[in-house]
């Protein structure tokens, strides 16, 4: 597998070794030993799958203060524009984001560590999206940020998006109480 650094330290794109022939292909989506060799997580406790239509934007979500969640995400069908935002107070990259195009064709994965908000926008007709999570979902620690926060300056590739009520009402990063943001630890 190939690990590709992004503009946010710790957030990496992962290209698995794909073995294919006329019959199809095979790749390891996750292997504890190989991930551990690259300093990536070797234990996940929850697996989520979502299907969404073109223009659906999910996010930006993170968990804090309990059960911070790292996510290994990928697309099994379709294509998405996937984004991670550093929300760790005191981080040298606080408020900055990294984006990766994930698709069934490129088979890339994106690792988003704890302390980063995550969201994605569906670019294809539909997308089947999968998440491996390092902690279970915790409603009391569920937090969101505005997808179009000017401070984050995310250049989403579609202007017409479909949001949940929760995501439409999410606060700007500047309006989030400090205790609802993780603290950067060098």
Image: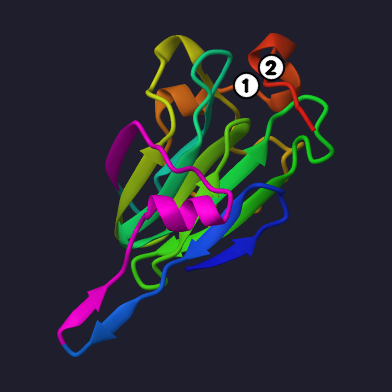
Give how far across and how far down residue 33 sits, in percent: 43, 54
Q: Which residue is mark 2?
A: 176
Total residue callouts: 2
**For numbered disc 1, what is the local secondary structure?**
loop
Q: Residue at 33% of width from left, 49% of height from top?
A: 129
Q: Which residue is mark 1?
A: 171
Picture disc at residue 38: none
Which quarter shows the C terminus? top right
Give how far across and how far down residue 31 sits, in percent: 37, 55
Q: Is residue 37 above or below residue 161?
A: below
Q: Is residue 99 above or below residue 25?
A: above
Question: Which residues are drawn in magenta?
Answer: 23-51
Q: Residue 81: in sight, yes or no? A: no
| Left or right: where 14 falls relative to 138 | right
Badge 2 vs badge 1, beta-carbon distance below 8 Å: yes
Comes first in the chain, label 2 or label 1: 1
| Left or right: where 78 falls relative to 162 | left
Q: CA distance from mark 2 to mark 1?
A: 7 Å
């Amino acid at each position: 597998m190939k690990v590709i650094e992004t503009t946010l330290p710790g957030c990496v794109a992962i290209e698995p070794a794909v073995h294919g022939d006329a019959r199809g292909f095979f790749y390891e989506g996750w292997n504890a030993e190989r991930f551990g060799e690259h300093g990536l997580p070797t234990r996940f406790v929850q697996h989520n799958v979502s299907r969404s239509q073109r223009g659906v934007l999910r996010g930006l979500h993170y968990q804090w203060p309990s059960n911070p969640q790292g996510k290994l995400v990928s697309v099994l069908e379709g294509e998405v524009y996937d984004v991670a935002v550093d929300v760790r107070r005191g981080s040298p990259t606080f408020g900055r984001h990294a984006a990766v195009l994930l698709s069934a064709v490129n088979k890339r994965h994106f690792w988003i560590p704890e302390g980063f908000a995550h969201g994605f926008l569906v670019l294809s007709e539909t997308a089947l999206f999968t998440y491996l999570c390092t902690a279970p979902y915790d409603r009391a620690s569920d937090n969101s940020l505005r997808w179009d926060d000017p401070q984050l300056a995310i250049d989403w590739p579609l202007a017409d998006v479909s949001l949940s009520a929760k995501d439409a009402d999410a606060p700007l990063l500047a309006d989030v109480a400090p205790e609802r943001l993780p603290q950067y630890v060098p």
